Image (cartoon, coloured by chain):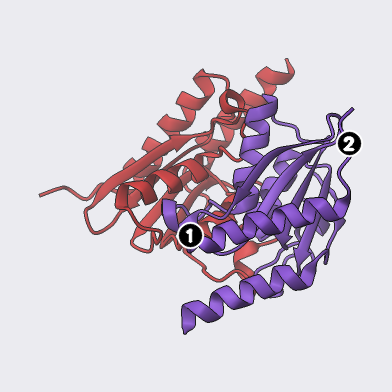
Chain colours: A purple, B red
Amino acid sequence: MTKQPIDQDLMARALTLAKQAQEIGEVPVGALIYHRPSAKIIAEAYNLCEATHDTSAHAEMLAIKKAQAHLGEKSLKDCDLWVTLEPCAMCAGAIAHARIGRLYYGAEDPKGGAVDNGPHLFHQPTIHHKPEIYGGLSARPSAELLKAFFASKRG
Amino acid sequence: MTKQPIDQDLMARALTLAKQAQEIGEVPVGALIYHRPSAKIIAEAYNLCEATHDTSAHAEMLAIKKAQAHLGEKSLKDCDLWVTLEPCAMCAGAIAHARIGRLYYGAEDPKGGAVDNGPHLFHQPTIHHKPEIYGGLSARPSAELLKAFFASKRG
């Protein structure tokens, strides 16, 4: 029997992915998709905007795409997305389109977040799906990783 | 010398792309990226969500990605995006990230649009780039294509 990983393990894994992004000069955000029926992580990703020149290559976008390819279907209603930073408008829109069941995120992003900041996208009547949302998990290490990254870029 | 295509040609081309989507059972939305310095279309795309199981495979997303790959850079500030339907929140977010210079769109989308409907994303202070926006161009043929498509799905 596959053991259900505890929540802390999943955010710790997302943080490890964020650190992998940092090591190659990408904005350190990591994400994974947990598939509840199989109790397995079915997709992992981190930001790849710099390497690919693709500004849509956010961790969440890549993880969602991988999970849909893995399952061979569009709906991720039985899946949870774990990500180290509050999603932006693009990623929040993608989360709605994919019908993600639950969103767990790390640090809030007052400057670019679109879930509990800015447009509060899931409260907009024209967004047709709203996941269960759990924010501020392991917020401090997620935020510190980003802060150190941007400080090093400025330095 | 490359002749500068007139605006009507560009939306007509986007409509042709939308019809190609329709022919393979995809939601008929077409998009292209016009690069002003070279006066050339550098990317064309249409919706591919069904074929790929990828709910982020909207015409705009695919066109932006192709244009960035073509230019080998992230910023599309010298480019215009032409799309037959008002972009959703995901695509509007992607347009901001890619710093698209001008957005030209066809039919308004009161149910899912995020530019002149719903969250009016480019009016949100946390969206860090706003293109010039020209909406409602060739709106009728764009809308009729979509209407016929969804009617055939229900029928």
Dot 1: chain letter: A
Vertical side of A54 occupied by A154: above or below: below
Examine the rendering and report whether any part of residue A73 can be seen: no
Q: Check disc 1 and report its element: helix, strand or loop.
A: loop
What label does residue A3 carry, if any? 2
Q: Does the residue at mark 2 contact the one at mark 1 (Cβ under 8 Å)?
A: no
**Residue B16 point in image, percent of width and height:** 41, 30
Query: Are the numbered discs 2 and 1 placed on the same chain, yes or no?
Result: yes
Q: Which residue is mark 1?
A: A24
Residue at x-position 57% and y-position 20%: B25
Q: Which picture quadrant has residue A107?
A: bottom right
Q: Residues within 10 Å of mark 1 (few under 14, many from 20)?
A: few
**Residue A37 point in image, percent of width and height:** 86, 30
Q: Residues within 10 Å of mark 2 (few under 14, many from 20)?
A: few
Residue at x-position 31% and y-position 52%: B71
For this orientation, the residue located farthest to the top is: B155
Vertical side of A100 occupied by B17: above or below: above
Q: Check disc 2 and report its element: helix, strand or loop.
A: loop
Q: Which picture quadrant has residue B120?
A: bottom right
Give the mark nearer the N terminus: 2 vs 1. Answer: 2
Dot 2: chain letter: A
Look at label 1 and name its amino acid. Ile
Q: Quick check: A138 left or right of A62?
A: right
**Residue A49 point in image, percent of width and height:** 49, 56
Examine the rendering and report whether any part of residue B6 can be seen: yes
Residue at x-position 58% and y-position 57%: A20
Vertical side of B109 occupied by B141: above or below: above
Camera-nearest residue between A17 and B7: A17
Camera-nearest residue between B37 and A48: A48
Residue at x-position 50% and y-position 26%: B21
Look at label 2 and name its amino acid. Lys
Q: Quadrant of the C terminus of chain B?
A: top right
